[in-house]
Each structure stands twice: as C-alpha cells, then as structure tokens.
Image (spheres, rainbow, N blue to C red):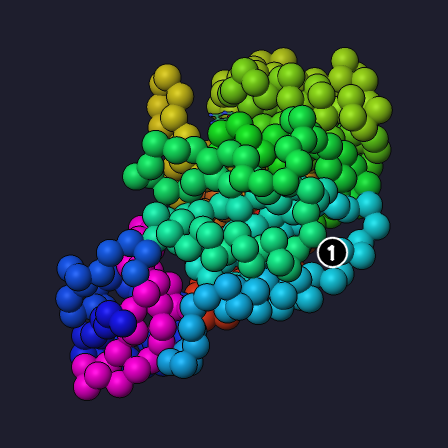
Amino acid sequence: MKTATLNKGKETKYKNQYPLIDEEDIYNHDHLKEGDLFYLVTEQGTYIATCYVGRQHKGLGWVLSYDQQQNIDIAFFEKLFTLAKEDRTYFYNLEGTNAFRLFNSEGDGVGGLTIDNYNGHLLIQWYSKGIYKFKYLILQAIQNVFQYTSIFEKMRFKDTDFEGGFVTGEAPEFPIVIEENFAFYNVNLNDGLMTGIFLDQKEVRKKLRDQFASNNKVLNLFSYTGAFSVISAPIAEQTTSVDLANRSRSLTEENFGLNSIDPKSQYIYVMDTFDFYSYAERHQLLYDTIVIDPPSFARNKKKTFSVMKDYDKLIDGALNILAPQGTLLLCTNNSAYSLKSFKNTVKKTLEDADVDYDIVEVMGLPKDFKTHPHYKPSKYLKAIFVQVK
Ligand code: SAH
C-alpha cells in the first residue's frame, strides 16, 4: 500500500476526522496517482486513515476508513450503501415523493460520489477521475443494495471527453416524470450536467408553497425549469419565471402542463435578471414573493456575475419591485460562501436600503443530502426567507 506522510502539526486535523486530504498538508504526493489507495500516516509513520486519490479543487483525495484492516472492496461499499439506505427510510416511505438522494459523498462516507434516485432511475455522479476508477466495485455494490430500473452516470470532473450516460438496466425514454411533495417534474438523466430539478431544494420549495405563495404574485428569478413557479402556481395569484436560457421556456411550460396548470396562465420571460429588473420597473410591476436562486457564477454577453461579489445587487434590484410587506427567498449553493457571510450581505444590503425586515426562516440541505460533521463545505445550501415590514 502506498503511504502519504502528513506535514508536521497536521495530525490533529485528520485524527479529528477531517475527511478531505488537503494537498498542502502532505509532505510529498508525487507518487500518488488518481484512483490509488493509500495510508495517511503521521511524520512518525503511524497510521491514521485509508484514503483514495481523487483530485477535486484543493483536495488530493478523501478518507475512506479509519481501520487499517479494512479492505476497500465490494463489501466495503455495500456496507456504506446499506447504511445510507437505512438512513433514508423516511424518504422511501414518504407519500408524494419518489426522487431523493441515496448517497451523499463525504456525508455518507465516500467523498466525490453521489447517487440519486429519480423514481427508480439512479444517477451516479463521479466527481474525480480517481473515484471513477472504482466504478466496477461501486456499481456491483449499488446493484446488490439498491433497487432500480436503470442506472445512469455523469462525469463531474474536467479531464475527460466522456460526459456519462446509460450504464445498465432498462433505459427509459426521457423525460421521465418524478414526483416531489405531490408536484410533478420532468427529468432527463442523459442531457448535460443538470437533470431538470435540483433535489436539494425540495424542502425550500415546500416551505415556499406552504407559507409564502398563497394568493401571491410570485417572481422566480434564475428559474431554469420553473420548479419554484410550478410548486407555487396552484395557489398563487400568478407566477413569473425569468431565465436567460432559451430552453427554459419550453421546459417550464412542460412542467406546468404536468401539473395541470395552463402555461399560458403564467408569465415566462427569457431574459437576463438585471434586464428584467429594469423592465419590471419600467412597467411598474410588483411582486409579493421574489425567489432568487442564482448559479454561483454566470456570464452573459455584457458582464460576469458572481454570487459572492454581486448578491447585494440582486437584492437591491428585487427591493425595487417588491410589493409592501413582501417576502424575499434568497438562496445560494456556493460552498465557499458561508452562511455567516451570506447572512451578513443580506443584512447589510437591507439595512443600507433602509428596509425594516425580519429573517423568518433559514434553511439548509434536506436530510437525504447528509453532511459531514467535520467538513463545513458539505453544508453548501443556504436559503433565507426575508419578510419585509
Ligand atoms: N433556481 C433554479 C436553478 C437555477 S440554475 C431551480 O430552482 O431549479 C441557474 C439558472 O440560471 C440557469 O437556468 C441559467 O440559465 C440561469 N441564468 C444564468 N445567468 C442568468 C442571468 N444573468 N439572468 C437570468 N438567468 C440566468
């Protein structure tokens, strides 16, 4: 077995079960190749953990086990998958929901690997070349533990020409329809990086419907396939979805259709968010609830946008078209943007704008997106409901 020696002073971090091996903490890693298993050892050579090499951002790889006798084989993955499955009994039994995450990387014991269930069609996402080298062990273990109709995969790392696709089982015709909290959404597991729905937002969507959509004019910015609009539409006065991508219009209309909502009864704009702000101001449009769920980075013809730098501009723009006593739902999935600094930006922007407000709800990931207690970035999702007074 290869070994990687920690630099002096770095033992405590890893003995305390930090799961990601930081390249800078290792004395020499030139001998470590993607997919290698290795023992992480102290300067004195004492064993700490068994890890694999899978480079992601600054990480060299992930801890798999703290037991030196543990073989990394099919049985190892089967055990983790079985635990993950038991952990999700709630979601298996949940009425009105048939899509959820089965295995959430480091939260469930293998960083760099996620498995989602879309009504029996499973999606494996590989986040490094290294974890992909374990494909056949992992696939065997998945097939032995989880029930499925088909399995698809996506490569979430850069150094590959292969995007992913069908792996095994009975391939469905896409889109398939999944149900979540009694609403229906189209999903395609075989078309680019996104599937049509972000499963990590399911509780935020439910909260929006249960508390902030009824009889309201709901504006959904960065709307993609319109999931926040679809969940609101049956009870809202009207919904408006805004997304820059052309494809968003038909995808959103189709999702409305699946839920027996006439797409023509809702507004859909293919437009840049900031252009929409100007448009809405010009036409004196006002909204009771404004959902802002942007990508971490975006670029259009004119400018680049980064959530960490520009969230204040998104809030300012929304305030100009928010009805009295309106609600903002502010989200970010950027793991580098901590809840603390995100909250600070929200508060500062509202205070600078002289707005009287309450933060009524702060939400994170649902339980199926299990996080790691010693690894903060795994809690990447932040959703803040702000009630303006
Ligand atoms: N809120 C969505 C997910 C957003 S994904 C949901 O709940 O499912 C990010 C979306 O932002 C993409 O669909 C992308 O087309 C859109 N987007 C990126 N830059 C944009 C911009 N400047 N204005 C409007 N939409 C933008």
Q: Is residue 53 magenta?
A: yes
Q: Quadrant of the N terminus?
A: bottom left
Task: Say what secondary structure mark 1 lies in.
Answer: helix
User: Is residue 192 in view from this perspective?
Assistant: yes
**Residue 170: x %, y % from top left:** 66, 36
Q: Is residue 290 magenta?
A: no
**Residue 7: x %, y % from top left:** 19, 74
**As rendered, which of 244 and 176 lies closer to the eye?**
176
Residue at point 16%, 70% (across, down): 27
In the image, is 122 to the left or to the right of 109? right
Q: Quadrant of the C terminus?
A: top right
User: Is residue 351 in view from this perspective?
Assistant: no
Tell me where residue 179 sits by quadrant: top right
**As rendered, which of 359 and 200 lies closer to the eye?**
200
| Amino acid found under the numbered disc labelled 1 | Phe
Tell me where residue 236 sits by quadrant: top right
**Residue 224: x %, y % from top left:** 58, 28
In the rendered view, would you say 85 is above or below 190? below
Residue at point 76%, 13% (across, down): 264
In the rendered view, would you say 373 is above or below 110? below
Label the magenta part by its dominant secondary structure.
Answer: strand
In the rendered view, would you say 321 is above or below 335? above
Whether disc 1's CB lies below 8 Å from ligand 1 is answered no
**Residue 304: x %, y % from top left:** 36, 28
In the image, is 270 to the left or to the right of 170? left
**Which contiguous range is marked in magenta?**
37-64
Residue at point 82%, 41% (across, down): 182
Tell me where residue 309 sits by quadrant: top left
Residue at point 53%, 46% (across, down): 124
In the rendered view, would you say 165 is above or below 37? above
Residue topped by disc 1: 91
